[in-house]
Image (cartoon, rainbow, N blue to C red):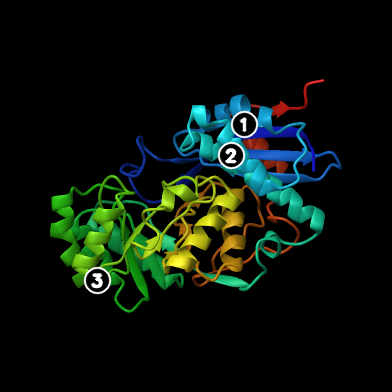
């Protein structure tokens, strides 16, 4: 294929979640920041991509417009894996990880969306075949901090049919409040977001074991300290999860096989090719892939397709918030804790143009080949 045009859409979608909005992001979190990429090939076939943008949308947009897309628009692409890995190589002076990988992730998703649309099949068919038509989902709650609120929203998610719930709590009383309500469901976990010191982790993990948590996520900093994470898992018998902040398959070389759950995020890791590379590593080493996916753009759709095609993936993460609108009104949402795999060609993501305009921070940036 040859890409003839790129459009970069920067969006902010307000949401509510019942919390103060403090604790998970560097600033108060009340909007979903999105940087969506639409590529169109020489035959007019379009595809959508998604670059991680929470609290960094201007940086992700700049990386796409200034660094990545000039290497994409107008170029022939025969092998998407090879092409996207080559993008990382060409941009290594700007950094192989973080914002660079977020921007390349958007390109990878959009190219694979085009490829599957051209073939007339869902993306899952192009990456291994559809093995499941629906997936178990867990309600990924935000951080409330107050035990009463933790109990309230845990109970609400369970009443909606979720058998798995993730907290983002870091205090014992708040986690215990969720655990009391969650007795009888299949899984309760908490994401610490690297907030515990090593000494705090040694103190807290026995309590997490006694509360029956299925995993503890990113208990300490840095989140890729495989030796420490592995030692904590072995010592306390509580599974450790990590990887949402790792980029490229190389970023998982230490954790895969050394902790139970690895968590590639398709719009951070470098795209679908890198995500699948992590799955290959996990399958070989006996780790389970628990994708990080608190998204509502093409990354959401892509994660569903990848999980449908790979048996090593277990639970789908659904961020338990209430956006002002779904950018694609036909978004496949969980029902009774299960979410369907999108049908139709490609990712299946088709945003409403009126909603793109309504939540746009600015007019879309358009890039075409230089004559």
First of labels 2, 1 by sequence position:
1
Tell which of 210 and 185 is nearer to you. 210
Residue depicted at x 65% and y 51%: 328
Does dot 3 land on a helix, a strand or a loop? helix
**In this figure, which residue is indicated by the disc labeled 2?**
104
Q: From this view, report whether residue 272 is shown above or below residue 70.
A: below
Query: Relative to 254, is 295 on the left or the right?
Result: right
Q: Is residue 56 above or below residue 19?
A: above
The residue at which mark 1 appears reads as: 68
The numbered dot on residue 177 is none
Instruction: Using residue 3 as the reference point, say whether residue 21 is left or right of it.
Output: left
**Answer yes or no: do the residues labelled 2 and 1 have beta carbons within 8 Å?**
yes
Q: Secondary structure at mark 2?
A: helix
Q: Residue at x 63, y 72 (%)?
A: 133
Give the residue pinned by disc 3: 180
Counting from the top left corner in percent of width and height, residue 309 is at: 61, 67
Quadrant housing residue 286? bottom left
The reply to whether residue 84 is visible in this rendering is: yes
* Residue 83 in the image: above or below residue 121: above
Q: CA distance from mark 2 to mark 1?
A: 7 Å
Quick one: SS at disc 1? Answer: helix
Q: Quadrant of residue 346?
A: bottom right
Question: Which residue is most to the top?
Answer: 371
Residue found 45% across the figure and 53% down from its top: 321
How would you rate the neighbour count of disc 3 (Cα within 10 Å): few for under 14, some for 14-19, many for 20 or more? few
Q: Are marks 2 and 3 in contact (CB under 8 Å)?
A: no
Count of labels shown?
Answer: 3
Distance of label 1 from label 3 (alpha carbons): 48 Å
């Amino acid at each position: 294929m040859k890409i003839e045009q790129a459009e970069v859409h920067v969006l902010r979608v307000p949401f509510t979640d019942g919390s103060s909005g403090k604790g998970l992001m560097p600033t108060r979190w009340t909007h979903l920041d999105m940087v969506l990429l639409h590529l169109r090939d020489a035959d007019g076939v379009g595809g959508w991509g998604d670059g991680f943008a929470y609290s960094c949308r201007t940086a992700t947009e700049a990386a796409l417009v200034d660094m990545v897309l000039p290497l994409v628009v107008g170029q022939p692409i025969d092998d998407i894996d090879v092409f996207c890995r080559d993008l990382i190589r060409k941009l290594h002076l700007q950094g192989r990880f973080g914002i660079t990988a977020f921007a390349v992730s958007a390109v990878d998703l959009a190219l694979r969306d085009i490829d599957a649309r051209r073939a007339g099949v869902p993306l899952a068919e192009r990456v291994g075949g559809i093995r499941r038509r629906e997936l178990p989902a867990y309600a990924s709650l935000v951080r409330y901090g107050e035990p009463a609120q933790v109990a309230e929203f845990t109970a609400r998610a369970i009443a909606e049919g979720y058998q798995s719930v993730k907290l983002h709590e870091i205090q014992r009383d708040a986690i215990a409040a969720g655990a009391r309500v969650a007795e009888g469901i299949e899984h309760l976990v908490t994401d610490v977001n690297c907030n515990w010191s090593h000494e705090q982790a040694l103190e807290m993990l026995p309590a997490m074991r006694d509360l029956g948590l299925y995993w503890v996520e990113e208990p300490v900093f840095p989140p890729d300290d495989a030796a420490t994470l592995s030692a904590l898992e072995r010592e306390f018998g509580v599974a450790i999860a990590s990887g949402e902040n790792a980029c490229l398959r190389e970023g998982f070389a230490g954790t895969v096989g050394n902790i139970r759950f690895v968590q590639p995020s398709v719009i951070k890791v470098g795209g679908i090719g890198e995500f699948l590379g992590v799955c290959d590593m996990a399958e070989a080493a006996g780790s389970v892939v628990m994708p990080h996916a608190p998204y509502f753009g093409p990354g959401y759709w892509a994660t569903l397709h990848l999980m449908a095609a790979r048996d090593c993936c277990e639970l789908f993460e659904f961020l338990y918030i209430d956006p002002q609108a779904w950018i694609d009104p036909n978004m496949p949402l969980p029902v009774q804790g299960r979410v369907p795999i999108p049908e139709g060609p490609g990712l299946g993501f088709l945003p409403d143009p009126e909603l793109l305009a309504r939540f746009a921070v600015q007019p879309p940036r358009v890039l075409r080949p230089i004559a």
